[in-house]
Image (cartoon, rainbow, N blue to C red):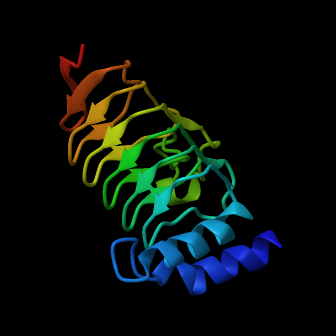
Amino acid sequence: MKKISLLLYYLFASNFPSYWWPGGPLFNTIRIALLRNVIGIGIGNKIQKGIYVGSGNGVKIGNNCQINERVRLDNVEIGNNVMIARECIVLGKTHLNSDVDVPMADQGRSEAFTSYIEDDVWLGLRVIVMPGVRIGKGSIVGAGAVVTKDIPAFTIWGGVPAKFIKSRI
């Protein structure tokens, strides 16, 4: 059932119009119904078109999340009330590169590392989250940032690599 749901999701449902279009809530319901057979997903979510979850391994989404167009998720656990803007990427693996005598393309990939996006987080447009990073509760990551290390709760970060900007409390 998982493979059939994944196939139907990628062939049809991932390309249905977004939530905001006429009929969008129905398309959202279909997307979520198919994804529920593939990944862990809570209730009250808005999943827009073009979301990529790979084979679904290691992807979990909490309740009341907004995940916008063309987001790519790999090995990530997302909490509740999270907002993810368009074209964000959460990576689960990287390429190995430690042996300078072997082409990087021949060194394989790292093991999968799970990233954690805690409750009430907002990721701005085109944020990239590297494997194994934890983004703390109530944090904001500015557009275009590359998150390479853990982010404490209730803080605002931005830049490449992402740097602390200020606290929210």
Name the foreground residue: 48 vs 117: 48
Q: Quadrant of residue 114?
A: top right
Quadrant of image for the N terminus = bottom right
Name the foreground residue: 53 vs 1: 1
Name the foreground residue: 162 vs 69: 69
Q: Position of residue 150 (x, y in %)?
A: 41, 24
Q: Would residue 45 be seen by someone viewing this image from the given angle?
A: yes
Q: Residue shown at 31%/54% (left/top)?
A: 85
Q: Residue furthest top?
A: 169
Q: Position of residue 80 (x, y in %)?
A: 51, 38
Residue 22 vertical position relative to residue 153 in the rendered view, above or below? below
Q: Position of residue 27 (x, y in %)?
A: 51, 78
Q: Residue shown at 46%/43% (left/top)?
A: 100
Q: Is residue 8 left or right of residue 50?
A: right
Residue 19 vertical position relative to residue 92 in the rendered view, above or below? below
Q: Is residue 140 left or right of residue 71?
A: left
Q: Quadrant of residue 148?
A: top left
Q: Residue shown at 69%/54% (left/top)?
A: 57
Q: Is residue 96 left or right of residue 9?
A: left
Quadrant of image for the C terminus = top left
